[in-house]
Image (spheres, rainbow, N blue to C red):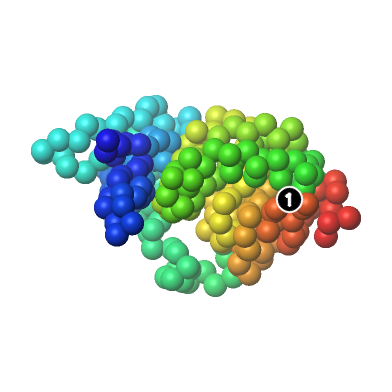
Amino acid sequence: MQPPPESGLRSVPTNLGPDQVLVEEPLLIEVGEETILTMRTPGHDPELALGFLLGEGILASANQVERLETVPVGEDSPTARVRAHLTPGVTLTPLARSRLSRAHAIRPSCGLCGLASAEGLTRALTPPASGQPATTLEVLTRIANTMRSRQHLFRATGGSHAAAIACATSGEVWAVREDIGRHNALDKAVGACAHQPLAEAAVVLSGRGGYELVLKAARLGIPIVASVSAPSSLAVDLADELGMTLIGFLREGGGRVYADDGRLEDLGSNA
């Protein structure tokens, strides 16, 4: 039986028989009078919209959104849409409109729109509290293991990214989300955890730790980012500039610590 598109999977024929592939379809996010079109794997669309608006610095708080409306797809509206209704009295600032218009232009292949250093990217951000929250590589590895156990789309297709957001101290996982895009996976997880105390959280990523994902975490006040693969040089510079914790190659037995500010209690034996 063909799985519904909202499951994120589709069966396609191959020379070796039917195979499951990830669905990739457009989503239109509407906020105020502005819109942005993104490609994503269907599922958790309202979370994706909210996480995108927060992670790109377009909105400062989830409380600025009164409700998220999924607009039914029909003949007059063939593209899936999520409409963010702002809380009365909230309007998009000129900076927010600028970020919305260029949010998908700032990617590794496109440069930094004139911002060529970590200092330029972090100038308007507030550094997290030094040494807080306390965690260990063992706790972060447990979070990664939980994330891996919930990567249902990856097990079916081998083609999805995942992001987990968890309490950095206890390791309690608040959300795991998957998507064909790694930015979308993090946005979906952020949208699911928007009302959690993110200053006490850690993000664990299934792929590499690129600067865009570290920057999203910084805008949200999340002080710890760990990935199962390598970070980029700019991601390291960003984390170091802001006093964040950045870990790569998070696997069984530890990880490689690229930046820390006193949060890792077992840093001495794993650095």
> Measured along the vertical axis of the image, is residue 172 above or below residue 244?
above
Task: Name the residue nearer the viewer: 238 or 40.
Answer: 40
Q: Is residue 266 visible?
A: yes
- In the drawing, does residue 99 fall left or right of residue 151? left
Mark 1, residues whose alpha carbon is within 10 Å: few (<14), some, or many (≥20)? few
SS for callout 1: loop
Residue type (three-letter) at the residue carrying disc 1: Glu
Position of 171 with respect to 77 (left or right) is right
Residue at 40% from the left image edge and 56% from the top image edge: 103
- The residue lying toward the viewer, choosing from 266 and 112, is 266
What residue is at 61 percent from the left and 67 percent from the top?
232
- Give the quadrant of the C terminus: bottom right
Please give the name of the residue rendered at 36% of the width and 30% of the height, measured from the top-left corner: 68
- Most distant residue in the right direction: 268
Quarter occupied by residue 215: bottom right
Q: Residue at x 73, y 50 (%)?
A: 252
- The residue to which callout 1 is attached is 252
Residue 89 in view:
no
Point out residue 133 in the picture as x, y percentages from the top left corner. Answer: 76, 40
Tell which of 16 and 202 is nearer to you: 16
x%, y% of residue 122? 60, 59
